[in-house]
């Protein structure tokens, strides 16, 4: 049903129509939903390896309760919770050498759901051959446990992006649960304007003063999804930054405490994170904080704060007092309070929301393609088994002219030129891509009488 929103006039709250509904095509994730069936076609993180000890663990994905466990032999399984015998939850099961044993009558299940033993039966019983516990495939990688929830014959290889395996980079797993829909948390990564307001001008400079400078903004498609491009003047420098969205629900973020002060070219990722859909009104950010010498020149990162329901920068979870969250709100407070499922029909999008709008468009296009029976399209670029991604921070030295408008244009042009180097060109299919991108940026800077490190 179409809902009419009353045109704005003062004191009009009583006159408003009841709330329109959320955009179910993009937000709902239960079995059979359009977005849910699309998201199921990709490996999704379900837990940190550190969360899985010698007991089974209840997890939830796409509105389904499941039980995750590790055998004594080290294999990981993800089973439907209710035992195929008479329904007792396998969260009370016993992890054994080759599977999970139900506590009630001792049936033993392998990680793929096969019934290995039905010990209450006579030894010659063949019952177990005609029964199987529901199971999903699992892949463990860099301290995260992923599941594949889609049709078995369409299971993709686990994709390795370039940022997953860089020399000198340490990937520290973390997760945070958000009591709201997955999309509003995910699309925040394509909303660079909130860095100016939420993270800087509204409370205090949570990262650095330069974040309060309203940037020139652009949003650019990539072979994996899209990036935002922000370009800012900061004293004699111009700071160009991009964050990735890798479709559908993987995002990568550049340096958290970047201050625009030190020249650099194509400095890479500080956060890789999936927004995993738990159900329609719960999601979980699961991913890695990257600890790399280039990512933290001011020594503000703190690995000891990264783990289960915790990360090392302010405002990312609901653990702070309500008063503190009101006085110094963070991402968690802004996003979870957009309603349990943000209602797009009630929004008034502005120019700075172009990234959010573009992401919704891309997702809708892919959801419909998959809904029509086509397969998701991975990036065609794979170099030595790794897929290039585009997140970066670059700082070039180019002093401002006195003409404010001309300088604004210059800053925008620098952002565009550097983005072309980062996103376009044959060098992205080269094994030494990072060095080549950096060299091209340096050459560009020299040609424009700038300098970069
Ligand atoms: S209910 Fe699980 S073995 Fe009987
Ligand atoms: Fe943020």
Image (cartoon, rainbow, N blue to C red):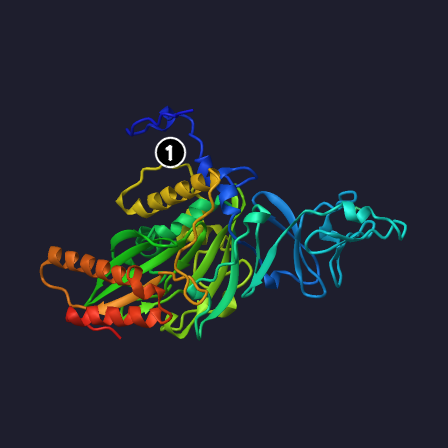
Image point (26%, 52%), residue name = 218
Image point (71%, 47%), residue name = 133
Residue 448 vertical position relative to residue 126 in the rendered view, above or below? below
Residue 333 vertical position relative to residue 444 in the rendered view, above or below? above
Q: Nearer the viewer, residue 298 or 446?
A: 446
Q: Is residue 30 left or right of residue 369?
A: right
Q: Is residue 433 visible?
A: yes
Residue 320 point in image, percent of width and height = 49, 55
Q: Is residue 269 left or right of residue 115?
A: left
Q: Is residue 377 left or right of residue 128?
A: left
Q: Which residue is mark 1?
A: 345
Residue 235 point in image, percent of width and height = 20, 66
Q: Is residue 339 visible?
A: no
Residue 56 point in image, percent of width and height = 69, 56
Image point (30%, 63%), residue name = 426
Farthest residue to the left: give it: 403
Q: Nearer the viewer, residue 258 or 437?
A: 437
User: Across the whole image, how many numbered discs are drawn on residues?
Assistant: 1
The quadrant in which the N terminus is found is top left
Quadrant of the rendered image containing residue 394: bottom left
Q: Nearer the viewer, residue 340 or 415?
A: 415
Image point (51%, 55%), residue name = 176
Q: Nearer the viewer, residue 437 or 123?
A: 123
Callout 1: helix, strand or loop? helix
The quadrant in which the C terminus is found is bottom left
Asked whether mark 1 lies closer than 8 Å to ligand 2, one says no
């Amino acid at each position: 049903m179409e809902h009419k929103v009353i045109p704005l006039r003062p004191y009009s709250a009583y006159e408003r129509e009841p709330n329109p509904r959320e955009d179910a095509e993009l937000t709902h994730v239960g079995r059979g939903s359009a977005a849910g069936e699309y998201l199921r076609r990709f490996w999704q993180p379900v837990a940190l390896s550190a969360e899985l000890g010698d007991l089974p663990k209840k997890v939830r994905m796409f509105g389904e309760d499941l039980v995750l466990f590790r055998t004594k032999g080290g294999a990981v399984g993800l089973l439907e919770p209710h035992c195929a015998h008479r329904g007792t939850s396998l969260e009370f099961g016993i992890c054994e050498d080759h599977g999970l044993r139900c506590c009630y009558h001792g049936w033993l299940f392998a990680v793929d759901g096969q019934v290995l033993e039905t010990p209450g039966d006579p030894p010659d019983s063949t019952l177990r051959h005609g029964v199987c516990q529901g199971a999903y495939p699992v892949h463990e990688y860099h301290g995260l446990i992923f599941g594949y929830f889609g049709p078995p014959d369409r299971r993709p290889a686990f994709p390795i992006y370039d940022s997953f395996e860089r020399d000198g980079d340490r990937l520290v797993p973390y997760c945070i649960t958000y009591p709201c829909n997955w999309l509003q948390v995910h699309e925040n990564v394509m909303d660079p304007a909130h860095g100016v307001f939420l993270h800087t001008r509204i409370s205090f400079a949570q990262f650095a003063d330069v974040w309060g400078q309203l940037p020139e903004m652009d949003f650019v498609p990539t072979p994996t999804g899209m990036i935002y491009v922000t370009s800012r003047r900061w004293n004699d420098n111009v700071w160009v930054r991009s964050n990735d969205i890798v479709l559908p629900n993987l995002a990568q973020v550049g340096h958290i405490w970047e201050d625009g002060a030190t020249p650099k070219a194509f400095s890479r990722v500080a956060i890789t994170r999936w927004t995993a859909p738990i159900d329609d009104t719960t999601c979980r950010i699961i991913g890695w904080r990257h600890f790399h010498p280039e990512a933290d020149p001011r020594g503000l990162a703190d690995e000891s704060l990264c783990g289960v329901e915790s990360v090392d920068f302010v405002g990312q979870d609901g653990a702070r007092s309500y008063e503190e969250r009101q006085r110094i709100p963070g991402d968690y407070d802004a996003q979870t309070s957009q309603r349990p499922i943000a209602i797009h029909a009630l929004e008034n999008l502005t120019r700075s929301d172009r990234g959010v709008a573009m992401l919704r468009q891309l997702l809708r296009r892919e959801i419909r393609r998959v809904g029509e029976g086509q397969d998701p399209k991975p990036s065609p670029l794979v170099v030595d088994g790794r897929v290039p991604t585009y997140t970066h921070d670059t700082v070039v030295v180019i002093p401002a002219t006195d003409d404010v408008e001309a300088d604004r244009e210059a800053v925008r042009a620098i952002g565009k030129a550097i983005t072309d180097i980062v996103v376009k060109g044959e060098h992205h299919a080269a094994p030494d891509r990072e060095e080549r991108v950096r060299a091209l940026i340096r050459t560009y800077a020299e040609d424009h009488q700038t300098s970069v490190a």
